[in-house]
Image (spheres, rainbow, N blue to C red):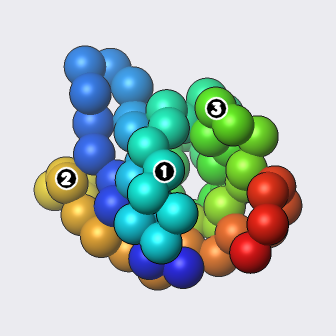
Amino acid sequence: MKVMLRKVGEKYEIYVPKKDLEELVVESEKDTIWGGTIKIANGWTFAMPDMPADTRLPITVEARKLSGGDD
């Protein structure tokens, strides 16, 4: 699903337009948010695409929802 990612201070925030949902990223599998899984504040987890660590934000990407909520 398409998600928009931006940085707010030292934290990342994700916006899911399909659900009109905006949440903070609370866990990241890797040191960067790219190429691994992330968990957002409401408990959903996403597989993030591989991107360079210095990718400019905000950016809209295709992330795969792994768990949480309804589809």
The residue that label 1 is drawn on is 21
Pointers 1 and 3 in contact (C-beta within 8 Å): no
Q: Residues within 10 Å of mark 2 (few under 14, many from 20)?
A: few
Q: Whole-Å distance between the Cαs marked 2 and 1?
A: 18 Å
Residue type (three-letter) at the residue carrying disc 1: Leu
| Chain-order first, disc 2 or disc 1 | 1
Residue 30 image offset from top left, x and y in percent? 62, 45
Q: Whole-Å distance between the Cαs marked 1 and 3?
A: 11 Å
Judged left or right of residue 1, residue 7 is left
Question: Which label is found at residue 57?
Answer: 2
Query: Helix, strand, or loop for circle 2?
Result: loop
- Image quarter of residue 71: bottom right
Residue type (three-letter) at the residue carrying disc 2: Leu
Residue 46 image offset from top left, x and y in percent? 66, 61
Q: Residue at x 64, y 32 (%)?
A: 41
Q: Residue at x 27, y 36 (%)?
A: 7
Judged left or right of residue 51, residue 8 is left
Q: Whole-Å distance between the Cαs marked 3 and 2?
A: 20 Å
Pointers 2 and 1 in contact (C-beta within 8 Å): no
- Can residue 34 be seen in the rendering of this structure? yes
Query: Helix, strand, or loop for circle 1?
Result: strand
Residue 27 image offset from top left, x and y in percent? 66, 34
In this view of the protein, which residue sits in the foreground, 27 or 24?
Answer: 24
Question: Which label is found at residue 41?
Answer: 3
